[in-house]
Image: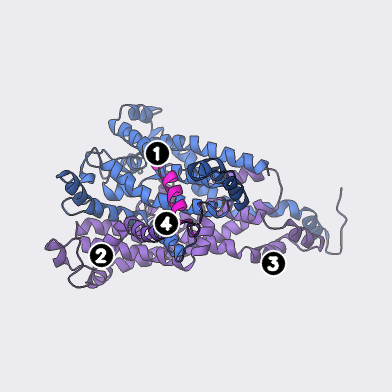
Chain colours: A blue, B purple
């Protein structure tokens, strides 16, 4: 079909005929451009760099799968990977813990709103500050936690100086804001649980855990989904706390992939960008397993609308 | 309502709930309270072993000292210099992308949308080497622009997810009616959709402000000098200088945490609306 020329001339009418088709692309252009330059391209470039030996300045040398072969035998890489799994598993505690606190706070007594905001507080604070707080909490000789263990067992434990416990100490610090996040998700979810279903179930004699499991939790599924997503991502992104609290120590026992990658790529002992990129690729692939799952579910929900 | 409202329970249950609430809160915020208390203790208190008691006198000079003797104020300023343009940029770009993806049906719409969503979840480390390299080559390494540009681009992913869902939920009749009237597409955006997006813009602004203010990783990767480093990275380097001078570390931590905390309490409703997007059907 040819557009008839109208009073505004042919150019304008062409725009008229096509503006609905073209407008979305014009609106997308700036955001998509930035996103392509700073997110999509770097992902591809990291894959490429991981096949090179490169200090960031001098020309790159192709090493093929060399960096990956080296990873395989790198003890520190294995420790980081193992710690990432510990993080992932223990971080999941944030979901039920957040639900627990949300249920505890889902009341209508006076002042409850202030309580809810104050419980949420840790999430608003920077992880750097959270890390410093917990470092103080665990500090040898005078830290509250040290005193507590001293009082309980006779000898105090300096968590962050102990290669066996340090990772758990950092994870506990990370759980604090993460639980707060899950809590707020569940509080919003609980606010929207259909009251008539609860009442009906109550008349049928459901109460306590049974009610929670069979009536409330199914209605909280969207909140649970988001809580799981943000918790998985949070666990694998853990960098700030490790960096602030232990710097990977003692004896490199608290490294995680995100931190080890940074160390390798930008450490004082010479930049190994290619090797760092290879670590990043491994972390990315692990994350992709989860991301694909999440996005898959979101696409299904979107289509089902 | 779940659980059963406490008001319907026995008097004893109500009393114990009222007693339990503040105890639980104090336990929950113990690390924060400890730091707050330590931040107003004079150094002599810590030296003499007064770690848990009240300060012998409130030492607000700790705050003065971290801000001006150790120049923490500079890092705070740097954080504002990075955070404010990022918020404006990311929110503006995502208003556009969100409108495009939320209003129009075209081939590739869902694909682009989910690229934004997925990009938002990737680990920072996969971007680190190329972004740092790109920043160096653009000649903006160790400047606020380095952080601003990256943050705008990365936050656009999350913001697009948010804006698109918000716009998709607006009544379509509004847009259809305007089209019938012959209103141009960009005018539909400007005069009809944008005014309705105010709550979304407010929610995203506070969220992005908090995310960027609290960013530590990119601050350490893309900046090095005291004139550009944001407060998170600054606090981390000061922490190295202070070696367990806990009254200073605490005061510094409190100062660094203050702006997002103030933002949260001032805009609480928007903040929570933003974070819990999608938590209810």
Check the residue under mark 1 and report the chain it is in. Answer: A
Q: Magenta stretch containing residue A96, yes or no? A: yes
- Is residue A235 something that shows in the picture? yes
Residue B258: quadrant of the picture: bottom left
Do the CB atoms of the residues marked 2 and 3 lie less than 8 Å apart?
Answer: no
Chain letter for mark 3: B
> Residue pushed farthest left?
B48
Could you say which disc has been placed on residue A88 in the image?
A: 1
Residue located beneath label 2 in the image: B37
State which mark lies toward you, 2 or 4: 4
**Separation (CA) of disc 2 from disc 4:** 33 Å
Q: Position of residue A195 (x, y in %)?
A: 60, 52
**Looking at the image, residue B26 lies above or below residue A57:** below
Q: Is residue B256 left or right of residue A17?
A: left
Magenta residues (range):
A88-107
Secondary structure category for the residue under label 1: helix
Circle 3 or circle 4, nearest the eye = 4
Residue of label 4: B13
- Whether label 3 touches label 1, CB < 8 Å: no
Task: Tell me where residue B188 appears, x and y as whole percent.
Answer: 72, 62
Q: Is residue A54 visible?
A: no
Indicate the quadrant containing the C terminus of chain A: top left, top right, bottom left or bottom right: top right
Q: Position of residue B233 (x, y in %)?
A: 33, 56
Q: Secondary structure at mark 2?
A: helix
Tell me the mark number nearer the camera, choosing from 2 and 3. 2
Q: Are marks 2 and 4 in contact (CB under 8 Å)?
A: no
What chain does mark 4 sit on? B
């Amino acid at each position: 079909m040819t557009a008839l020329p109208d009073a505004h001339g042919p150019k304008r009418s062409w725009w008229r005929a096509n503006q609905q088709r073209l407008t979305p692309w014009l609106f997308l252009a700036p955001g998509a451009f930035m996103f392509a330059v700073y997110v999509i391209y770097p992902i591809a470039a990291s894959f490429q760099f991981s096949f090179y030996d490169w200090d960031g300045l001098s020309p790159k040398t192709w090493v093929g799968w060399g960096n990956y072969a080296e990873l395989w035998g790198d003890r520190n890489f294995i420790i980081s990977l193992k710690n990432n799994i510990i993080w992932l598993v223990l971080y999941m505690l944030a979901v039920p813990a957040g639900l627990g606190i949300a249920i505890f706070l889902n009341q209508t007594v006076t002042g409850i709103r202030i309580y809810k905001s104050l419980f949420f507080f840790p999430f608003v604070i920077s992880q750097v500050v959270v890390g410093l707080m917990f470092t103080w909490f665990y500090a040898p000789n005078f830290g509250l936690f040290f005193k507590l263990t001293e009082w309980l067992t006779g000898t105090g434990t300096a968590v962050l100086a102990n290669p066996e416990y340090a990772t758990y100490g950092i994870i506990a610090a990370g759980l604090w804001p993460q639980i707060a996040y899950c809590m707020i998700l569940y509080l919003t979810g609980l606010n929207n649980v259909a009251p008539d279903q609860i009442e009906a179930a109550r008349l049928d004699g459901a109460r306590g855990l049974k009610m929670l499991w069979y009536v409330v939790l199914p209605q909280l599924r969207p909140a649970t989904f988001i809580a799981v997503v943000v918790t998985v991502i949070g666990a694998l992104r853990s960098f700030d706390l490790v960096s602030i609290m232990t710097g990977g120590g003692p004896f490199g026992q608290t490294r995680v992939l995100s931190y080890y990658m940074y160390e390798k790529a930008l450490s004082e002992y010479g930049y190994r960008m290619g090797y760092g990129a290879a670590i990043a690729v491994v972390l990315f692939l692990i994350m992709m397993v989860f991301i694909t799952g999440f996005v898959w579910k979101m696409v299904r929900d979107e289509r089902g609308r | 309502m779940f659980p059963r409202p406490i008001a319907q329970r026995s008097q004893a249950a109500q009393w114990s709930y009222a007693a339990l609430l503040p105890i639980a809160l104090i336990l929950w915020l113990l690390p924060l309270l400890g730091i707050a208390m330590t931040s107003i203790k004079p150094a002599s208190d810590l030296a003499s072993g007064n770690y848990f008691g009240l300060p012998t006198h409130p030492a607000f000079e700790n705050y003065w000292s971290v801000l001006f003797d150790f120049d923490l104020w500079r890092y705070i300023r740097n954080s504002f210099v990075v955070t404010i343009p990022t918020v404006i940029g990311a929110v503006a770009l995502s208003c556009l992308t969100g409108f495009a993806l939320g209003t129009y049906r075209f081939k590739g719409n869902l694909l682009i949308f989910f690229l934004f969503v997925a990009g938002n979840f990737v680990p920072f480390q996969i971007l680190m080497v190329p972004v740092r390299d790109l920043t160096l080559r653009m000649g903006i390494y160790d400047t606020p622009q380095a952080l601003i540009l990256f943050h705008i681009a990365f936050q656009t992913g999350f913001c697009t997810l948010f804006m698109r869902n918000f716009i998709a939920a607006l009544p379509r009749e509004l847009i259809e009616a305007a089209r019938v009237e012959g209103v141009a597409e960009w005018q539909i955006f400007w005069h009809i959709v944008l005014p309705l997006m105010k709550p979304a813009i407010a929610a995203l602004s506070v969220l992005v402000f908090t995310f960027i203010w609290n960013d530590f990783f990119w601050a350490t990767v893309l900046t090095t000098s005291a004139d550009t480093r944001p407060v998170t990275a600054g606090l981390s380097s000061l922490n190295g200088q202070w070696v367990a001078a806990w009254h200073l570390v605490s005061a510094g931590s409190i100062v660094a945490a203050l702006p997002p905390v103030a933002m949260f309490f001032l805009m609480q409703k928007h903040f929570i609306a933003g974070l819990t997007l999608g938590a209810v059907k």
